[in-house]
Amino acid sequence: MDFLELVRNRYSCRAYKALSVEKEKLDYIMECVRLAPSAVNRQPWHFRIVSNEEEKAKMQQCYNREWFKTAPLYVIASVRHDEEWVRADGKHHGDIDVAIAVEHLCLAATKQGLATCWVCNFDTALCKELFGLSEDEEPTVIIPIGYADDEPKKKMRKAIHEIVK
């Protein structure tokens, strides 16, 4: 599949089959994440794979939605603020760097025949507490990963002339 087809196939999945994700596929995905670019190559991120039942139950406390509970595993993507690059005007780039890496994750998962969804509307304080994250580490996004048990909805996108000048 070429890159445009890959991008077109990626969507926000909200139902997963009760199938495990193969280690080889997860390894491929995380290698793609590892290779993501970041500002000044700081790589100010940390990724925690949540796949055992005890940790999944904790994760589901942070985002209590029925569809979310169907995922066989989650990845918590965090920014490490003590490692992020800060531009001269004070702009922090950690969130941008994590976003780039997470989209690498989502596209790599799609390439492996898996589905994902960006989850940003979760209880970050509870997540930080339940998973014992350090003071400088902020959970930014949770990504459920698994085999889709739904169909993608038509993507509504602006016309190219509305976004490019």
Image: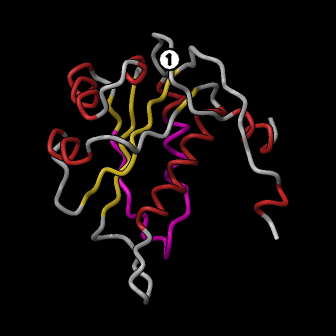
In percent of width and height, residue 83 lies at 33, 70
| The C terminus, quarter of image | bottom right
Colouring scheme, one of rainbow, by chain, secondary structure, one colour:
secondary structure
In percent of width and height, residue 4 lies at 80, 44
Q: Nearer the viewer, residue 123 or 39?
A: 123
Determine whether, in the image, residue 24 is placed left or right of residue 126. Answer: right
Residue annotated with mark 1: 16
In the image, residue 27 above or below residue 17: below
Mark 1 burial class by Cα count in 10 Å: few <14, some 14-19, many 20+: many
Q: Give the image quarter of residue 143.
A: top left
In the image, residue 80 above or below residue 130: below
Q: Nearer the viewer, residue 121 or 52?
A: 121
Q: Residue at x 27, y 70 (%)?
A: 82
In the image, residue 51 above or below residue 156: above
| The N terminus, quarter of image | top right
Q: Secondary structure at mark 1?
A: loop
Q: Residue furthest right?
A: 161
Asked if the magenta segment contains residue 36, the reply would be: yes
In percent of width and height, residue 24 lies at 52, 28
Q: Give the image quarter of residue 98.
A: bottom left
**Mark 1 is on which residue type?**
Tyr
Q: Residue at x 43, y 20 (%)?
A: 67
Q: Residue at x 39, y 40 (%)?
A: 142
Q: Which residues are magenta?
A: 27-48
Q: Nearer the viewer, residue 106 or 91?
A: 91
Determine whether, in the image, residue 156 is placed left or right of residue 82. Answer: right
Q: Residue at x 53, y 32 (%)?
A: 116
Asked if the magenta segment contains residue 149, the reply would be: no
Determine whether, in the image, residue 156 is placed left or right of residue 105. Answer: right
